[in-house]
Amino acid sequence: MCDTKLMTQRDLANPTPSVTDGRPADLRAEAFQGVRDARSRELAEDYVELIAELIHDHGEARPVEIAARLGVRPPTVTKALDRLAREGLITRAKYRSVFLTDEGRALARECRRRHEIVLRFLLSLGLDAETAERDAEGIEHHVSERTLALFAAYASKS
Amino acid sequence: MCDTKLMTQRDLANPTPSVTDGRPADLRAEAFQGVRDARSRELAEDYVELIAELIHDHGEARPVEIAARLGVRPPTVTKALDRLAREGLITRAKYRSVFLTDEGRALARECRRRHEIVLRFLLSLGLDAETAERDAEGIEHHVSERTLALFAAYASKS
DNA sequence: TCTGATTGTTAGCATTGTCTAACTTTATGC
DNA sequence: GCATAAAGTTAGACAATGCTAACAATCAGA
Ligand SMILES: [Mn+2]
Ligand SMILES: [Mn+2]
Ligand SMILES: [Mn+2]
Ligand SMILES: [Mn+2]
């Protein structure tokens, strides 16, 4: 009943399938896949970057401090650190502080570099420091090397 | 045994607790919380933006097409659409195409606007179209209104 | 050296977001 | 109109990411 104006399938059989605004749907899908990949790396990136920073500034990285900086609860950190250890980015012993592996250190350096380029770029655009830091924290995980190069060029030339 | 050089807790009691590079840890945590919030909205944003686009271009939004564009499997779309319906962003009936609610339409418009500003900005910086589209797809979810304004200004003035 | 405070882990729960396999419904083409 | 193809859903698995409550280990101070 009540067959109002519900459209049925294949209502408007499109002669040019899977193309929108010039780009094939394939490429769109690839873009989305890339974003999903980046999202899956975000957490590890923020953790190793923060751990490196804590080690640099305080000599060590303690879970309680990581939790405070990230704004999450300690058990969340425990679980995340277990994952990072499984992925070979950190080493740790129960109830001790956290260490970066060579791989973790390399990733941390890369993340820090990206973070700083993005942050400096936003600041050089005229953004206030707090908003810049907030936006950079999210954007940093989604900028390609190519974009990063343009950001760096703009920031240094301004 | 083997008590090598493992540091113990409170090794370097820091006199200035919870401050790094000038900003209180609180603000850092807020930034991370903001990124987590943004991440939790990403999926809904991409879906409603895509649904609006499909309705505009093809007259309707079918799950199979959504799946193809996003590069995910149909059951993933079914589940996601159920969530969107629960959140009041879309309406749908089994085996039928998807419709946006007023709220969904408003969100879609907002997302499209952000997407386009970010995209145009990246292009005006000199980025190639494909990379720009890829980066914009991720960045769009992490730009504040303030940053967006600067992006728009830069793009129009270049 | 106790002992209380702090730190960290474990257990268990919820949600999200992805998949495959199997099934159902709808559409298409003869 | 039926048979097959296409689209969509359901069921069930799994990993990630968060939480609280409860317990365990460590540290720090008297
Ligand atoms: Mn970040
Ligand atoms: Mn960062
Ligand atoms: Mn997007
Ligand atoms: Mn988008």
Image (cartoon, coloured by chain):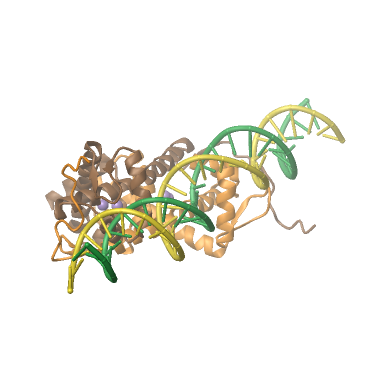
Chain colours: A orange, B brown, C yellow, D green
For this rendering, which residue is in front, B82 or B157?
B82
Q: Work out whether residue B90 can be spotted.
A: yes
The reply, left or right, for residue D24 in relation to residue A75 is right
Image location of residue C13, percent across then percent down:
56, 40
Front residue of B106 and B102:
B102
Q: Residue at x 56, y 42 (%)?
A: A65
Position of residue B146 relative to residue B115, above or below, is: above
Q: Residue at x 16, y 44 (%)?
A: A5
Q: Quadrant of the N terminus of chain A?
A: top left
Residue B28 place in picture, x, y as percent? 44, 40
Query: Total number of numbered labels?
Result: 0
Is residue C22 toward the left or the right of residue A157 in the image? right
Q: Nearer the viewer, residue A1 or A79?
A: A1
Tell me which corner region of the image, top left, top right, bottom left or bottom right, holds residue B63: bottom left
Q: Residue at x 21, y 56 (%)?
A: A9
B12 lies above or below A8: above
Between residues B24 and A157, which one lies in front from this camera angle?
B24
Q: Position of residue B64 (x, y in %)?
A: 28, 58
Residue B54 in the image: x percent, y percent? 20, 53
Whether residue A61 is visible to the viewer of this picture, yes or no, is: no
Rendered position, A90 above or below B105 = below
